[in-house]
């Protein structure tokens, strides 16, 4: 993987600071996290949501942080194109009338978020849904979806790929363009 | 990763990876079934026909529910109320149905091999919902799922299959599956209901003494006595069968360990299973039924025709 890296978008230190900033921004808009729930998207958004939740728990009392994981495989719009293997969904609380913060690593075409919004509605009717991503590839959207919190906004072409690496999965924390 | 087969005709054709993929996907569908809206849009452009040439309550309803939970369009066909009664052949019936743009066929038939025959002649994906005395693959998958859910593993598990082994497609599918997943298998029942060369052919233990079988096993999968498939009496009376091979609470309590009791249904109460066992703490029979929907959703989801 290393050999095809075009550019480092976020170094380990930058990524750590960005995660902290996103956590603070979420808190700024959802003081004390009253009626707010955090939902990380499987599989790779969960690494980011794990970190953000960890930050939030360091600031507010941990029991105020309601945290779930959502898998959108069964809601994809390309089910008949190729087989996608599902991951586990775990939302052990009601999201009805809650403010949901959806978390994913990279916002690209917007199709994952479209599916996530559909999936979310099957769990109840949230009062508001906002979107938090680590990287926003802003010129590649195929649907009218924009993030409310973005760690880094970048301009890329379709042939490029943004890879977010996490210590627990990929051996190190960084975001690279390949 | 995907299944190695286009159809689900029998567990015989699956490999261990296929079984693991189905079981892990079923686990995700089981979570879907706990949601306020127990439905996903995955197969909303798919039409499935349930072709039942043999009576069924559980399996047909379970498949239909699985299909609807996946948002598929569902057609139901029961041979008793159809043109088969007028003499139309199986292949003609299916081809007529397929010309109405049906994508998948779920089929139960009293003739062993009927779905295999169909698979050779039609382009749609076929799921065997039980063929004669051959296989009932989704039952074996949901049995395995339920065992794994209850006991945490299949590898090394000691499973006794008890009763009418001779006429049971559930038994055969279960044996194929458990073997592939590394479980140990024993079949138990009266000698007249156990095929003579089964130990050599399938690599299973054979036991004619019920108590010994129960002492050996972690799980007892108790089969229904299938009087409709017996041309001649193979035991003297149902009462005598119950005395020798019926599972009784007293016996379970004397084992000095907990075992899990399973049954594919429908139960002949007071024959192979006493009521206080079927409804008692050892039984996971209703969990099996619940898991059946999730397992069938997984099978349909994984088998649906895809571009790549």
Image (tube, helix red, strand yellow):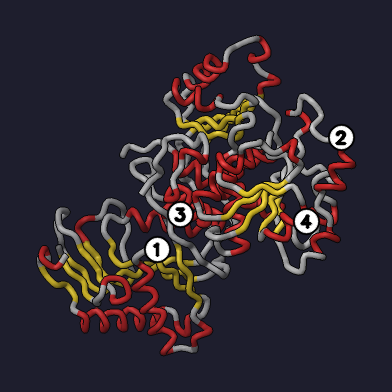
In the image, A139: left or right of A105? Answer: left
- Kindly state the secondary structure of the residue where label 2 is placed: loop
Labels 1 and 3 share a subunit: yes
Marker disc for residue B211: 4
Rendered residue at 70%/20% (across/down): B81
Residue B263 rendering spot, x and y as whole percentages: 71, 48
Which mark sits nearer the N-terminus, 4 or 2?
Answer: 4
Q: Label 2 lies in what chain?
A: B
Q: Which residue is mark 3?
A: A118
Marker disc for residue A42: 1
Residue A54 rendering spot, x and y as whole percentages: 40, 83
Which mark sits nearer the N-terminus, 1 or 3?
Answer: 1
Q: Which residue is mark 2?
A: B236
Between the residue at mark 2 and the residue at mark 3, the CA separation in whole angstroms equals 59 Å
- Kindly state the secondary structure of the residue where label 4 is placed: helix
Residue closer to the observer: A85 or B147: B147
Between the residue at mark 1 and the residue at mark 4, the CA separation in whole angstroms equals 48 Å
Residue closer to the observer: A173 or B15: B15
């Amino acid at each position: 993987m290393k050999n095809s890296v075009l550019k480092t978008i976020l170094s380990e230190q930058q990524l750590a600071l960005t995660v902290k900033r996103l956590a603070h921004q979420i808190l700024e808009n959802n003081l004390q996290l009253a009626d707010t729930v955090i939902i990380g998207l499987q599989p790779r958004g969960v690494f980011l949501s794990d970190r953000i939740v960890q930050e939030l728990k360091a600031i507010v009392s941990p029991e105020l942080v309601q945290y779930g994981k959502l898998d959108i495989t069964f809601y994809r719009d390309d089910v008949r194109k190729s087989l996608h293997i599902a991951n586990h969904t775990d939302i052990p609380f009601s999201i009805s009338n809650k403010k949901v913060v959806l978390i994913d690593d990279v916002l690209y075409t917007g199709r994952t978020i479209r599916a996530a919004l559909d999936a979310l509605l099957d769990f109840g009717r949230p009062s508001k849904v906002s979107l938090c991503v680590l990287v926003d590839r802003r010129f590649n959207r195929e649907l009218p979806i924009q993030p409310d919190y973005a760690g880094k906004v970048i301009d890329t072409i379709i042939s490029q790929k943004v890879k977010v690496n996490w210590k627990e999965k990929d051996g190190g924390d960084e975001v690279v363009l390949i | 990763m995907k299944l190695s087969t286009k159809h689900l005709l029998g567990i015989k054709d699956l490999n261990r990876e296929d079984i693991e993929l189905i079981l892990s996907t079923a686990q995700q569908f089981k979570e879907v079934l706990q949601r306020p809206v127990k439905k996903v849009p995955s197969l909303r452009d798919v039409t499935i026909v349930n072709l039942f040439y043999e009576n069924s309550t559980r399996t047909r309803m379970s498949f239909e529910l699985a299909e609807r939970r996946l948002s598929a369009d569902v057609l139901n066909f029961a041979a008793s109320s159809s043109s088969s009664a007028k003499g139309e052949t199986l292949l003609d019936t299916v081809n007529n149905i397929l010309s109405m743009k049906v994508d998948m066929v779920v089929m139960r038939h009293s003739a062993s091999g009927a779905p295999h025959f169909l698979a050779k002649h039609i382009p749609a994906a076929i799921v065997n919902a039980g063929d004669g005395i051959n296989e009932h693959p989704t039952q074996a998958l949901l049995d395995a799922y339920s065992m794994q859910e209850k006991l945490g593993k299949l590898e090394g598990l000691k499973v006794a299959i008890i009763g009418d082994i001779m006429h049971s497609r559930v038994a055969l599918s279960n044996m194929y599956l458990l073997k592939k997943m590394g479980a140990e298998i024993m079949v138990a029942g009266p000698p007249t209901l156990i095929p003579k060369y089964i130990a050599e052919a399938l690599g299973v233990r054979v036991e004619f003494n019920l108590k010994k079988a129960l002492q050996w096993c972690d799980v007892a999968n108790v089969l229904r006595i299938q009087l409709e498939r017996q041309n001649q009496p193979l035991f003297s009376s149902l009462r005598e069968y119950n005395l020798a091979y019926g599972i009784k609470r007293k016996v379970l309590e004397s084992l000095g360990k907990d075992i899990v009791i399973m049954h594919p249904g429908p139960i002949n109460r007071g024959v192979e299973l006493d009521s206080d066992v079927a409804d008692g703490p050892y039984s996971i029979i209703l969990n099996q039924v619940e898991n059946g929907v999730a397992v069938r959703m997984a099978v349909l989801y994984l088998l649906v025709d895809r571009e790549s």
